[in-house]
């Protein structure tokens, strides 16, 4: 149905498709690949920015490895231990989400009042400690940065933290799923125009 929408008739009628392709994956897979990918006119082409735009700087990926602080490592180990115990239906999806959250930050419930102290809040997370160090360097060079944070509660916490740390006159801009389309476009334009240096973005937004 997807191919029929993109390029009607590419795979024949429904009857022809059923006769030709509704076999085992081993048989129909290579046929479909030849028809859609390897033919003289591929169904779709994936173009990366570096393929169509000239003058882009070379992309660099730098891994920053930092050992988790004790409190964060203990919380992570606790989630792993629960994952190794008796499981219930749907439990592992929750475990995966917990691991993601703890890897980002151990959370308010483990920190108590330390949650509201900027330095202690940052020091409680290896990932956040590394990110702040990078942001400090970028801010010192007057370079712009994009900070991707999926957790909405952490986005909200970082807004005030970054504003205080870098003495910003305005709160850092946030773009996430709660921001309407026109507002999102306006905020992107502000970043492009160099009115904003450190926006916080949800990965999906």
Image (spheres, rainbow, N blue to C red):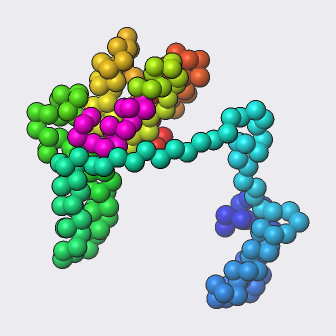
Q: Residue furthest top?
A: 169
The residue depicted at 34 percent of the width and 24 percent of the height is 162
Q: Residue furthest left?
A: 112
Q: Is residue 94 left or right of residue 1?
A: left
The residue depicted at 38 percent of the width and 32 percent of the height is 133
Residue 130 within the segment the image draws in magenta? yes
Compared with 20, 188 (above or below) is above
Magenta highlight: main SS:
helix
Q: Is residue 203 left or right of residue 169?
A: right
Where is residue 58 shown, x and y percent of the image?
67, 39
Q: Which residues are magenta?
A: 122-135
Residue 179 seen anywhere in this rendered image of the structure? no
Where is residue 77 shown, x and y percent of the image?
21, 61
The mark tally for this picture is 0
* Quadrant of residue 35 within the rendered picture: bottom right
The residue depicted at 69 percent of the width and 80 percent of the height is 29
């Amino acid at each position: 149905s997807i191919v029929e929408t993109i390029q009607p008739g590419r795979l024949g009628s429904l009857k022809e498709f059923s006769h030709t392709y509704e076999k085992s994956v081993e048989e129909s897979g290579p046929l479909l690949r030849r028809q859609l990918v390897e033919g003289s006119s591929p169904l779709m082409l994936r173009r990366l920015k570096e393929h169509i735009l000239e003058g882009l700087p070379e992309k660099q990926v730098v891994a920053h490895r930092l050992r988790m602080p004790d409190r964060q490592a203990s919380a992570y180990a606790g989630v792993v231990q629960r994952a190794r115990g008796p499981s219930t239906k749907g439990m592992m999806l929750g475990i995966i989400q917990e691991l993601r959250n703890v890897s980002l930050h151990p959370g308010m419930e483990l920190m108590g009042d330390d949650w509201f102290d900027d330095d202690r809040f940052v020091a409680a997370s290896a990932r956040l400690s590394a990110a702040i160090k990078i942001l400090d360097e970028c801010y010192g060079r007057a370079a712009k940065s994009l900070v991707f944070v999926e957790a909405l509660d952490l986005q909200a916490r970082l807004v005030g933290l970054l504003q205080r740390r870098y003495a910003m006159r305005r709160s850092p801009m946030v773009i996430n799923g709660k921001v309407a389309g026109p507002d999102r476009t306006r905020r992107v334009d502000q970043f492009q125009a160099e009115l904003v240096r450190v926006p916080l973005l949800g990965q999906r937004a």
